[in-house]
Amino acid sequence: AQSVAQPEDQVNVAEGNPLTVKCTYSVSGNPYLFWYVQYPNRGLQFLLKYITGDNLVKGSYGFEAEFNKSQTSFHLKKPSALVSDSALYFCAVRPLRGATNKLIFGTGTLLAVQP
Amino acid sequence: NAGVTQTPKFQVLKTGQSMTLQCAQDMNHNSMYWYRQDPGMGLRLIYYSASEGTTDKGEVPNGYNVSRLNKREFSLRLESAAPSQTSVYFCAGNSGGYSYNEQFFGPGTRLTVL
């Protein structure tokens, strides 16, 4: 079965330190990969995506993510965390098979950045 | 542009009552989606509409129906609400088809079924 795993329910990091939010996937072929962020009582906002090409992709608010095909991972990173980065982060995968653009979401990781 | 809008923002129902959640987009999206978000379970797809005039079941369709009224609007109906349907519901849209475009989400509807 196709799935996305976010192994950490919560990640705690001090402001100014680098952060990593992990994501691994189990999908056949080379899927499209996405990260979304959700602030309290808001809808999801798109951060970045990997389609093809360079394994390191850059997105909004200084975030980047590294695609690793051999480890089937797509970890979200930021060199220096801000308190305002505190939010719920979702990894999502769009399998390439089929014409419908459905996404499979992970369960989310709560990022808490302490001042 | 308003983007993806949802009404209502909050709703409390009693078991057995019915209601329709409304979603509209002005982004010319071909595809639209309904998700529910529950703690520890991420987002699960209820129904989707790949294009105007078509709808298909997602991962958790039981207890729900949908209507793609036109290209802009995609509604979700609960015919007989149950406490298990207490959740936050999100509508989303994107270009659909073979594209790799991201989905754009509405602000959500928080539904409580007593």
Image: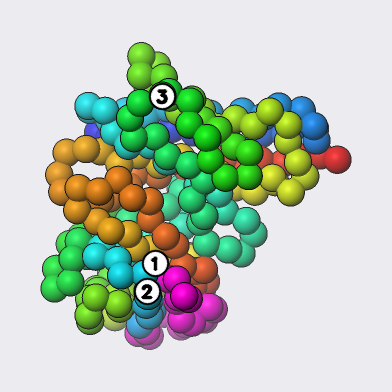
Q: Nearer the viewer, residue B4 or A14?
A: B4
- Dot 1, how many residues are within 10 Å of its Cα: few (below 14), some (14-19), or many (20+)? many
Which of the two marks, 2 or 1, is nearer to us in this view?
Answer: 2
- The kind of secondary structure element at disc 2 is strand
Residue beneath disc 2: B25
Residue B36 in the image: x percent, y percent?
41, 61
Q: Report in which chain the residue with disc 3 lies.
A: A
Q: Which mark is residue B91?
A: 1
Q: Magenta span covers which residues?
A: B1-19
Q: Which mark is residue A104?
A: none
The stretch drawn in magenta includes residue B7 = yes
Tell whether A45 sits left or right of B93. right
Q: Is residue A6 magenta?
A: no
Q: Which residue is mark 3?
A: A54
Q: Residue at x 29, y 33 (%)?
A: A31
From the viewer's perspective, is residue B114 above or below residue B41?
Answer: below
Q: CA distance from mark 2 to mark 1?
A: 9 Å
- Residues tagged by mark 1 and mark 3 found on one chain of the structure: no
Q: Chain of mark 2?
A: B
- Quarter of image, res B49: bottom left
Instruction: Please identify the quarter of the rendering in which residue B29 is found.
Output: bottom left
Dots 1, 3 in contact, CB < 8 A: no
Q: Nearer the viewer, mark 1 or mark 3?
A: 3
Quick one: A82 or A103, which is closer to the camera? A82
